[in-house]
């Protein structure tokens, strides 16, 4: 399995899914999805859309196994690391951290991993204490 991208969206409609897909997947690529209606406009947008319907296959575990694995691992991190206590306004940051760790899980060189962490820290907008902690106190 390769790299992942994760983003918080308001709902699973095509209007929410399409901007994420356009910003992360090159037009003309093959996009494999389940039968969700929100993906129905992918072909109009220049993607090759391959649908796999779990209800129509004999081997249900083979349908999008990477997606199910990542979702399962994220649930474990949220329950273990954060003890199930997640604030919606911080959810994207949690997903960003998980994505960073997942995409570098096979890095052979610790120094390279450290370099990438520093690089990301330099390129990320800083947060002050008020925006991180005091935001939830009202």
Image (cartoon, helix red, strand yellow):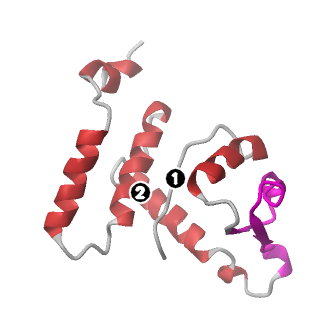
Label 2 belongs to which residue?
99
77 vs 29: above or below: above
Residue 6 marker: 1
Query: In the rendered structure, does residue 51 fall within the stretch colored magenta?
Result: yes
Q: Tell me the residue at 59%/49% (across/down).
A: 23
102 vs 94: above or below: below
Q: Is residue 99 left or right of residue 112?
A: right
**Would you identify the image quadrant in which residue 94 lies?**
top left
Q: Name the foreground residue: 82 vs 53.
A: 53
Q: Residues within 10 Å of mark 2 (few under 14, many from 20)?
A: some
How many numbered circles are shown?
2
Q: Residues within 10 Å of mark 1 (few under 14, many from 20)?
A: few
Q: Tell me the residue at 38%/16% (across/down).
A: 137
Dot 2 lies on which element? helix
Q: What percent of the width, then of the height, locates residue 98?
A: 39, 55
Q: Name the foreground residue: 116 vs 7.
A: 116
- The part of the chain drawn in magenta is 30-56
Q: Tell me the residue at 30%/24% (across/down).
A: 133
- Contact check, label 2 and label 1, Cβ < 8 Å: yes
78 vs 121: above or below: below
Q: Name the foreground residue: 109 vs 63.
A: 109
Res. 102 in view: yes
Dot 1 lies on which element? loop
* Of pointers 2 and 1, the one earlier in the residue sequence: 1
């Amino acid at each position: 399995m390769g790299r992942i991208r994760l983003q918080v969206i308001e709902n699973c409609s095509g209007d929410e899914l399409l901007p994420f897909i356009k910003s992360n997947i090159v037009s003309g690529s093959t996009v494999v999805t389940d039968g969700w209606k929100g993906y129905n406009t992918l072909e109009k947008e220049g993607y090759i859309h391959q649908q796999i319907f779990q209800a129509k296959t004999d081997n249900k575990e083979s349908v999008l196994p990477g997606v199910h694995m990542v979702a399962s691992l994220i649930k474990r991190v949220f329950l273990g690391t954060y003890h199930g206590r997640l604030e919606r306004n911080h959810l994207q940051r949690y997903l960003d951290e998980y994505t960073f760790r997942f995409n570098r899980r096979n890095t052979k060189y610790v120094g390279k991993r450290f370099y990438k962490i520093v690089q990301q820290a330099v390129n990320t907008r800083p947060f002050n204490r008020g925006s991180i902690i005091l935001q939830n106190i009202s």
